[in-house]
Image: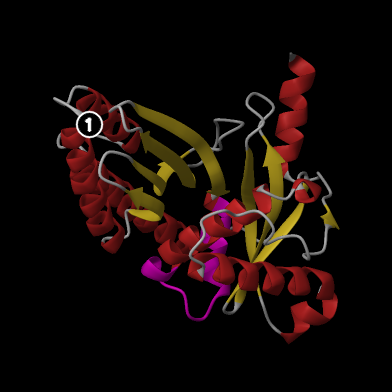
Amino acid sequence: MNAISTEGRIFVAQLTRDVAARARAGARRLSPGAEDWDAAFRAFALAVSEARGPLQSAEMFRAALKRLKAAQGERACFLNASMQRKRSAFMEVLTYVVSQHPLTHAGYEGVAVQAYRLLLQRNGRITLSRGGTIAFLSWHALARMSERSSKIDIFDASGLVAGCGWAAWIMIASEKHHHTEINFAVGDIICTGVLRLNATDRNGFYDVLTALPLDDEYEARQPARVRQGNAIFQATLAYVNADNADPRGYADQIAVIPFRDTDYVSRELARMENEQ
């Protein structure tokens, strides 16, 4: 396997700095003074719970939705779903953060897509649910994106991070794809990885292991991967453009590709399990 180039290393360093800075800015939009999204959502939920009544809680929620839409415009998050009534409200937000691998908690930092849900009931009670990581793009995968695409730059890669998050959202909802290979084709590259399950809380996430050039030569060698990659891209596009935020059903017709657990992360997870 070829080593990561100097240009690839510089690309990832710049990208992770950019994502980390936008994550802090987005968190502070939601809750001034917060240093990260976890702290921001907890602080906001606490503030709403201490409101004078349901109407004030709903107004605070409405204002937060506006701030999150502004943060989305700055590419710090994605407001996946929201609902607002006079006394009740709901939001589902995908955020982008810099982190180590969600299972091994080791190695170089990559970029994770994480999910949060807030439900405000008519009596003013608010519930915060953290869905955890739904996609993780490894340092290696991010570096390969810069090396193997003729079109990509930092901002396009950040957009691709969001795309992998949406792809993960619809694939996690499909049980037949759990523990199988997942490919996501965008432009002239294809992201390949696995839909892993976290044994602790059974949450699934798209573990993006690498990115490869999507050209005629690759398509001739890996037609099944390319067909799946294009199908997941089209399903993701349909989901993003739909009015309903329910991700179920979009992956029903997408082929299943068995996963060969010979990658470094799979070997490391097996080693960790054997040592327990």
Quarter of the image for residue 50 reads top left
Magenta range is 140-156
Q: Position of residue 219 (x, y in %)?
A: 77, 79
Q: Is residue 106 above or below residue 74?
A: above
Tell me the element at label 1. Answer: helix
Inspect this view and state whether residue 209 appears.
Answer: yes
- Name the foreground residue: 268 vs 103: 103
| Residue ID at (66%, 32%) | 198
34 sits to left or right of 194: left
Membership of 141 in magenta stretch:
yes
Q: Position of residue 115 (x, y in %)?
A: 46, 42
95 sits to left or right of 265: left
10 sits to left or right of 201: left
Secondary structure mainly formed by the magenta segment: helix
| Number of numbered discs on residues | 1
Q: Position of residue 252 (x, y in %)?
A: 76, 60
Q: Which residue is mark 1?
A: 54
Membership of 223 in magenta stretch:
no
Inspect this view and state whether residue 16 appears.
Answer: no
| Residue ID at (77%, 74%) | 227
The amino acid marked with disc number 1 is Pro
